[in-house]
Image: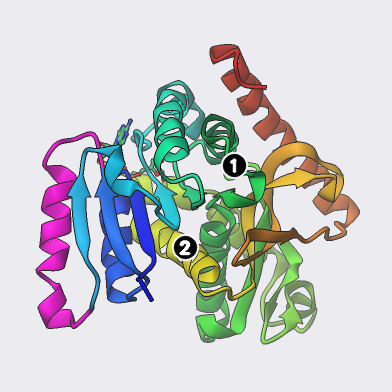
């Protein structure tokens, strides 16, 4: 059986890390696409040359020609401009919307059957626009945010409780921005929900609140440290987790920016919700019940995303 084909649209920091991970995990053959001549070719060759030592079987190709992504099974989109220090995700909107248009058209023409994972920020608006520009079904176009935000939350919790990250589950819902909703009720250590751990005296509400805030500021913390770019190792790993769930039909339950059509009271809208990812892409949006306070935070987050979507519509009147 032919190997799956994974097209990475954008060969920058995240794109290169995605290519390296996909090859090491032997998820398929990798095509790196970018508009910057030389960058995708150079990274593809460099990673291919790591193959003999690592011992993976995967072909890598770098290109500036959309024809090379033909019939890709998965497309992961990082094309665009990353956030610089002092720049909010929303500042990126105008620049990256234009990029989504060209990427969407490229995917529509050459890889219309792919499962498309968008990483470009501001995420919830970009994935919404990418779905429209590509014309692909909504179950095949999804945004990566919740897996990363949850991974950050899980990391901080595992340090606080001094337990393995494997035993910490966490759920972060809503938009990928300052209004994201880390849910404590649905986050557990060894199956014990966080509010119970506070009651048991394992931690305090104050410490938990600080961890939640640090999770919300997770992207900005890395930007502040790196100074010349944004996070790339964890974002790439999160998207690979989603791609693997699709390629191996794992039916993983992962929080993603998915199209909601009635679920969680949302109508025709992309936002971070629990989903099941399998061979058909988004197999299901899990319609969880939120508590009153979670619902208030979620609504606020949805409003923030709606603001971005309206801003996109104001820029491009063809978006509906
Ligand atoms: N088509 C294809 N590639 C493009 C286009 C385009 N129209 N415009 C820009 N690019 C490429 C750039 O040439 C660059 O190589 O996208 C790549 C982006 O890479 P980086 O600048 O290194 O950004 P990265 O850190 O990988 O982040 C990518 O993910 O988290 C988000 O906010 C982040 O939107 C940003 C994206």
- Highlighted magenta segment, given as a residue range: 34-56
Task: Give the percent coordinates (x, y) of residue 234.
Answer: 40, 61
Q: Decide if ligand 1 comes within 8 Å of the CB at mark 1.
A: no
Against 173, residue 240 (above or below) is below
Q: Quadrant of the N terminus?
A: bottom left
Q: Within 10 angstroms of label 2, few (less than 14), some, or many (20 or more) residues?
A: many
| Label 2 residue SS | helix
Quick check: can you spot residue 144?
Answer: yes
Looking at the image, residue 315 sits to the left or right of residue 75; the answer is right
Q: Which residue is mark 1?
A: 178
| Label 1 residue SS | loop
Looking at the image, residue 320 sits to the left or right of residue 18; the answer is right
Q: Quadrant of the C terminus?
A: top right
Q: Which of the marked residues, 2 or 1, is nearer the chain's N terminus?
A: 1
Q: Which mark is residue 114?
A: none
On whether residue 42 falls in the magenta region, the answer is yes
Quarter containing ligand 1?
A: top left
In depth, the one of 284 and 153 nearer the eye is 284
Q: Residue at x 26, y 65 (%)?
A: 20
Question: How many numbered tags mark residues here?
Answer: 2
Q: Residue at x 40, y 54 (%)?
A: 72
Is the Cβ of the residue at disc 2 closer than 8 Å to that at disc 1?
A: no
Q: Which residue is mark 2?
A: 238
Q: Within 10 angstroms of label 1, few (less than 14), some, or many (20 or more) residues?
A: some
Against 145, residue 171 (above or below) is below
On whether residue 93 falls in the magenta region, the answer is no
Task: Give the percent coordinates (x, y) of residue 97.
Answer: 47, 26
């Amino acid at each position: 059986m032919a190997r799956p084909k994974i097209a990475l649209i954008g060969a920058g920091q995240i794109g290169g890390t995605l290519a390296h991970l996909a090859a090491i995990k032997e998820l398929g053959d990798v095509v790196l696409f970018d508009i910057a001549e030389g960058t995708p070719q150079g990274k593809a060759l460099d990673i291919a040359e790591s193959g003999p030592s690592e011992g993976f079987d995967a072909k890598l190709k770098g290109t500036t020609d959309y024809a090379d992504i033909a019939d890709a099974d998965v497309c992961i989109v990082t094309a665009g401009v990353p956030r610089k220090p002092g720049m909010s995700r929303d500042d990126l909107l105008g620049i990256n919307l234009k990029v989504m248009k060209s990427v969407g058209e490229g995917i529509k023409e050459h890889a219309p059957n792919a499962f498309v994972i968008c990483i470009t920020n501001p995420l919830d608006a970009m994935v919404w626009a990418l779905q429209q520009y590509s014309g692909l079904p909504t179950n095949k176009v999804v945004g990566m945010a919740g897996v990363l935000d949850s991974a950050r939350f899980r990391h901080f919790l595992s340090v606080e409780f001094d337990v393995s990250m494997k035993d910490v589950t966490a759920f972060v819902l809503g938009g990928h921005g300052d209004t994201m909703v880390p849910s404590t009720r649905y986050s557990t250590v060894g199956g014990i929900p966080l509010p119970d751990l506070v009651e048991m005296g394992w931690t305090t509400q104050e410490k938990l609140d600080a961890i939640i805030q640090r999770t919300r500021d997770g992207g900005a913390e890395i930007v502040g440290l790196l100074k010349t770019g944004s996070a790339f190792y964890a974002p790439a790993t999160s998207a690979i987790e989603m791609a693997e769930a699709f390629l191996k039909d794992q039916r993983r339950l992962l929080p993603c920016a998915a199209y909601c059509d009635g679920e969680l009271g949302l109508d025709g809208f992309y936002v971070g919700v629990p989903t099941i990812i399998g061979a058909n892409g988004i197999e299901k949006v899990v319609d969880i019940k939120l508590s009153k306070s979670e619902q208030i935070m979620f609504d606020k987050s949805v409003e923030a995303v709606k603001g971005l979507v309206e801003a996109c519509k104001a820029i491009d009147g063809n978006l509906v």
